[in-house]
Amino acid sequence: MSSTFTMYSTPWCGYCHRLKSQLDREGITFDIVDIEQVPEAAKIVEEANNGNQTVPTLVYSDGTAQTNPSLAQVKEKLAALAS
């Protein structure tokens, strides 16, 4: 099964590390992309955040995005996608 979303992050982002560990604890699978290593990914993040490179930015299989969401917001979005 492919993951339902991609998390765009940076190695130094504390919010990214926190959300990643929460998602891992919940057993939620996702792809992760370092925007400092992948220039195209930085553009995706900028498009979702009015030109800003704000991380973590999650982009879902339906094309929608969330910026720095809580674990509850991610779970709510995944439930909506699954229904």
Image (cartoon, rainbow, N blue to C red):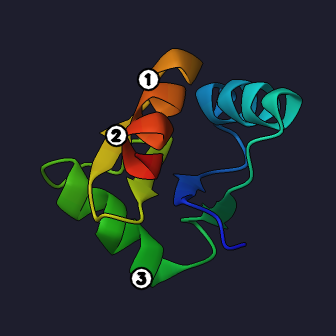
Mark 1 is on which residue type? Gln
| Image quadrant occupied by the N terminus | bottom right
**In this view, 66 is above or below 41:** above
Contact between labelled residues 1 and 2, with CB atoms less than 8 Å apart: yes
Numbered label attached to residue 63: none
Mark 2 is on which residue type? Gln
Q: CA distance from mark 2 to mark 1?
A: 9 Å
Q: What's the residue at 53%, 56% (across, down)?
A: 8
Q: What's the residue at 40%, 68% (across, down)?
A: 42
> Where is residue 48 drawn, in percent x and y?
23, 54
First reached walking from the N terminus: tag 2 or tag 1:
2
Q: Is residue 40 left or right of residue 43?
A: right
Numbered label attached to residue 40: 3
Numbered label attached to residue 66: 2
Q: What's the residue at 17%, 55% (across, down)?
A: 51
User: Which secondary structure lies at badge 2?
Assistant: strand
> Where is residue 21 drawn, in percent x and y?
81, 30
Q: Which residue is mark 1?
A: 73
Mark 3 is on which residue type? Glu
